[in-house]
Image: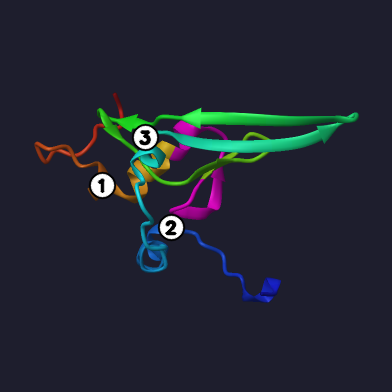
Amino acid sequence: MGESDLSAVTDVRARVAEVEQNQPPARGDTAAHERMLETVRQDDYRGHHIVIHTTYRIEVDGRLVTGHLGVTNDGRVHYHAVPNLSFPSAVDLVRRLIDTFPDEFERSDGTGHDLGH
């Protein structure tokens, strides 16, 4: 794929159906994977090999947020559902998920989330 084949995504909602259609089939027991989101970053510095395991357990209104989350060596966070975007923090990422996928975060009483609290 060349650079000319890439297109800018200004609104990730336009890609939701495409991402959902291309998601791989579930394999085996994913319960442990869904409870904790772990990333592993590695670097070599002055003859030392650095390995950083970062584990996230993200909840919104008491419900787990599941999926593939990654952290780059410069600390930016990205999420598999919106792979072309990265965020300065996990909080910023979750806020964008709430904005992009509001139906996934609707409260059981049907009121949706109050992002101002």
Q: Residue furthest right?
A: 46
Picture disc at residue 35: 3
Residue that mark 1 sits on: 104
- Cα–Cα gap, marks 2 and 1: 15 Å
In the rendered structure, are the residues bearing label 1 and label 3 in contact, judged by CB atoms less than 8 Å apart?
no
Q: Residues within 10 Å of mark 2 (few under 14, many from 20)?
A: some
As helix, strand or loop, the secondary structure at mark 3 comes to helix
Residue type for callout 1: Glu
The quarter holding residue 110 reads top left
Label 3 vs label 2: CA separation? 25 Å
The residue where tag 2 is placed is 12
Question: Closest to the observer: 117 or 101?
Answer: 101
Please tell me which of labels 3 and 2 falls first in the chain. Answer: 2
Residue in the foreground of this view, choosing between 104 and 44 = 44
Q: Which residues are magenta?
A: 79-93
Where's residue 101, x and y in %? 31, 50
Q: Check the image and name the residue furthest to the front.
A: 28
Indicate the position of residue 20 as horizontal and vertical percent values.
36, 63
In the picture, which quadrant includes the N terminus? bottom right
Label 1 sits on a secondary structure element that is helix
Labels 2 and 1: the sequence-earlier one: 2
How many neighbours does mark 3 have within 10 angstroms: few (below 14), some (14-19), or many (20 or more)? some
Residue at 47% x, 53% y is: 82
- Residue 100 in picture, x, y percent from top left: 36, 50
**Which of pointers 1 and 3 lies earlier in the amino acid sequence?**
3
In the image: residue 79, left or right of residue 112: right
Amino acid of disc 2: Val
In the image, what residue occupies the spot 52% across and 54% down? 83
Instruction: Say which element carries label 2.
Output: helix
Left or right of 77? Residue 106 is left
Q: Quarter of the image holding residue 61?
A: top left
